[in-house]
Amino acid sequence: MARRELTEINAGSMADIAFLLLIFWLVTTTIESDMGIKRQLPPPVPDDIDIPQAKEQNVFNVKVNFLDLLLVEGLPLDMVDLKDKAKDFLIATGDGVMSHVINGETIAKNRDVIMITGANGKINAAFPERELVKRADVRLKIAEYQQIVKIAAPEDKDAFSKVLEKWNVKLKTIDLLGGDYKQLPASALISMQNDKSTTYDTYIQVQNELQSAVNELRDELALEKFGKTYRELEEIYGRNKQDKKTLDKITAVRALYPQRISEAEPRDASANYY
Amino acid sequence: MTQALITTDMGKFKKGGSRPSGSISTASLPDIVFMLLFFFMVATVLRTEDEKVQVTKPEASELYKVEKKHLIRYVNIGSPMDTRYGTEPVIQLNDQFSQPAEIQEWIIKERETLAESEQSKMWVSLKVDKETKMGVVTDVKQELRKATALKVLYSATSRARTGEEE
């Protein structure tokens, strides 16, 4: 009989209570999944400033009209082909395919660069000319700026140190990539223009495809050089901001394929071709 | 031996029957459900504002996830849920419909809710319906630029890259 007194409280309804709580929670909350395409808007520009025009060959022009049709480098194009076209632009060197060879292999292998007719009617005018960054030149610059920093006036020291740091980063990049590399000229960019009546979905698809082109090239390079995709490198760095080695790798990949997708000043694109 | 023990302890089973088919103990069910509950409590946030506009996000593959959610402010653009307000796309800031001209002031207010060190890290997430025309989005973007809220996120749902299978 003594054992009888030790009866447990019936916990059968406990599950029901917990279920009620769970359902209440499910109804009142949302799973916050805020993911999206990130963009840095350009800072506001005063009206009276003339924006310098980049060389035509250095700009990859994407225009979208009010019917959501694309005009890329002066020619109509399907959305599915946009990524490859953008890649062509990013790997082109002006003298054809990305020619610099690293460890006996071209980075942009298996990909032919199709000549593009520019809006001015010239063939091949659509490619920016990549500039060769040579190890010897970088070494010279570093030596030069080390001297300058030494003798610079105290107030200028910071500025010169920063320049020196930039050249040091370039040297690291050369080391990591295993040789001299070609960099995009500073004015090279992918520019997108849309009409007021373009639908947002099309705008996002264009932005996505352009981003995709950059990301895929970066992944390809990072995988070949460091055995990890660019995204993985970023994740590793994101977890540990002290990881300077990974940061150097990221910088190296970025040096070859910079993110240059510009949010153009809004204007009615339709006026240009209708 | 086992048979005998069970029959005496539980007193439920017919004597001399074949193998007893006892009911499964549900004692751990509450624990399981509680675990589920806690999982959802951790993985979700309380809905803070009513969505007053209909937003179907576009799909994209190159997504970025902002880790610090408290840095995000939302701008919703879409047709009003309540059709009495019309069907043209409207802008919703916090809980109310707004004009593009109100964005600058809103940004300044929202920025003040963040710690000083984090004010420059604020994100503006644009939740825009995919059928919206770009005109209104461009207006919003221009206002954001004027307010120097330059970090934007075009909110989208995930899909595979073009030319790739997931």
Image (cartoon, rainbow, N blue to C red):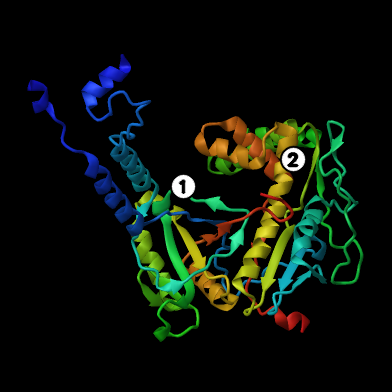
Q: What residue type is labelled 1?
A: Glu
Q: Is mark 2 on a helix, strand or loop?
A: helix
For mark 1, name the chain: B
Q: On the rendered structure, is B100 left or right of A194?
A: left
Q: Mark 2 points at which residue?
A: A221
Whether tag 1 and tag 2 are in contact, CB under 8 A, the answer is no
Residue B21's place in the image compared with A181, above or below, is above
Q: Mark 1 points at which residue?
A: B67
- Observer able to see residue A170: yes
Residue at the spot 34% in from the left edge and 34% down from the top edge: B24
Where's residue B116, x and y in %? 36, 52
Where's residue B152, x and y in %? 52, 60
Where's residue B82, x and y in %? 40, 80
- Placement of the N terminus of chain B among the 4 image quadrants: top left
Q: Which residue lies furthest to the top in this view?
A: B1
For mark 2, name the chain: A
Where's residue A169, x and y in %? 66, 37
